[in-house]
Image (cartoon, rainbow, N blue to C red):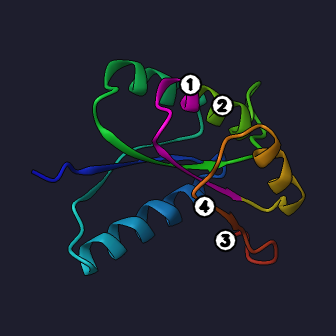
Amino acid sequence: MIQTLNIVILEDEIKQREYIVNFVNRYSSFEMLDVKVVLATDDPKKILNLINHDKNSQYLFILDIELASNDITGIELAEKIRILLPFTDIVFLTSHEELAMLTLERRISPLNYILKNKESNFM
C-alpha cells in the first residue's frame, strides 16, 4: 500500500506560503498524486511538534532558508529534521543562492534547492 506523501511548508511570507500551497494542490490534483499539504506555517516549532507526534508518515519538507521573525533558520530546522527523519526529502526554497553550499557543508543533502524570483516575490 502506497502511503500518502505529506507536504510540510515553512515560509514566513504569507503570500508566498499561500502560493506554494495552491501550486502543490493544483499540481497534485492535475497529476492525480496521493499528496496532502498537512502543514504550512512560518513557525519551525510547529514543524518539529508535528514530526515528534508522527514520525511514521512520509514527508516532503519545503523550507524557506531565511526567516525574518524566528530564532531558527530553515537550515537549522533541516538539521533537526535530518536527526529525527534521516531519509526524508527536504527542498529548500529561497532567494539566497549563496547559501546553497552551506546546505551541503552541513550535510543536509537536500533533494532540491529552488530559487525564488526576487522581482515578483514568487518562484
Amino acid under label 2?
Glu
Residue situated in front as seen by the camera: 106 or 10:
106
The residue lying at 40 percent from left, 19 percent from top is 52
Farthest bottom residue in view = 30
Residue picked out by circle 1: 83
Amino acid under label 4?
Gln
Residue picked out by circle 4: 16
Vertical side of 114 occupied by 70: above or below: above
**In this rendering, which labeled residue sits more in front, label 4 or label 1?**
1
From the image, which quarter does the C terminus lie in? bottom right
Instruction: Please give left or right for residue 97 compared with residue 74 in the image.
Output: right
Label 1 with label 2: CB-CB less than 8 Å: yes
Marks 4 and 2, the one that precedes in the sequence: 4
**What kind of element bears circle 1?**
helix
- Measured in 3D between alpha carbons, the distance from the residue under mark 4 to the one under mark 2, in whole angstroms, is 23 Å
Label 3 with label 4: CB-CB less than 8 Å: yes
Mark 4 Cα-neighbour bin, 10 Å: few <14, some 14–19, many ≥20: some
Q: Is residue 82 magenta?
A: yes
Instruction: Please give left or right for residue 103 compared with residue 122 in the image.
Output: right
Residue picked out by circle 3: 122
Residue 103, position in %: x, y? 76, 46
Residue 13, position in %: x, y? 66, 52
Region of the chain picked out in magenta, as a range: 81-93
**For residue 66, what is the image quadrant?**
top right
Residue 54, position in %: x, y? 31, 25
- Measured in 3D between alpha carbons, the distance from the residue under mark 4 to the one under mark 1, in whole angstroms, is 28 Å
The residue lying at 16 percent from left, 53 percent from top is 2
Residue situated in front as seen by the camera: 113 or 43:
113
Amino acid under label 3?
Phe
Label 4 with label 2: CB-CB less than 8 Å: no
Residue picked out by circle 2: 79
**What kind of element bears circle 3?**
loop
